[in-house]
Amino acid sequence: MTVAHDPADRARLTYAWGGDHWYLIDEPEPTVILINARVSQGRAYATAAEAEEAFWDGVVTSLTTGPAPLWRLWQSDRGRWWATRTVPFSRAAEEAGAHRTVDDHSWSDVRALIVEQEQRAMLADAEAARP
């Protein structure tokens, strides 16, 4: 798929971390775009919901892997999954209830909690930036 030169102006969601820039575009079709130093690629999805799920899958993978992940993961000796954010959220995000450490029974549940915290932070930071 050909990727628009600068998808940021058309994106409904954007996220950047560690050189990866993720964009979710709804028009003309739901598309997730990744741009970094190695690749510029996009993938279309049948529905906006599928595209948003793929967007967050890509973001969480980027946030939890690599030499300096934003979220560190571990499993306790009792089998519970934990994740902690290595960089603090903004004050606005923390006041909105974003938590730096989350835990649950499974990796998929912790993944959902990471997405929830990042979404909460994005909304709080956007609101704080309004004049």
Image (tube, rainbow, N blue to C red):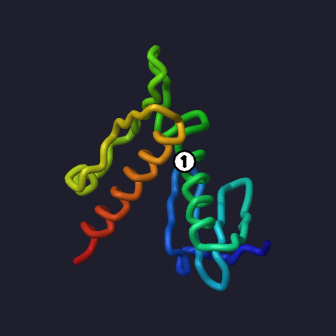
Position of residue 88 relative to residue 42, above or below, is above
Q: Quadrant of the N terminus?
A: bottom right
Q: From this viewpoint, which residue is outermost toward the top?
A: 77
Residue at horizontal 71%, vertical 71%?
Answer: 44
Q: Which x, y percent locates residue 85?
A: 40, 38
Residue at horizontal 66%, vertical 85%?
Answer: 28
Asked which quadrant contains residue 5, the reply is bottom right
Q: From this viewpoint, which residue is outermost toward the right?
A: 1
Amino acid, disc 1? Val
Q: Which residue is mark 1?
A: 60
Q: Residues within 10 Å of mark 1 (few under 14, many from 20)?
A: some
Q: Which x, y percent locates residue 104?
A: 42, 34
Q: Secondary structure at mark 1?
A: helix
Q: Is residue 101 left or right of residue 30?
A: left
Residue at horizontal 22%, vertical 77%?
Answer: 131
Asked which quadrant contains residue 121, the reply is bottom left
Position of residue 62 relative to residue 128, above or below, is above
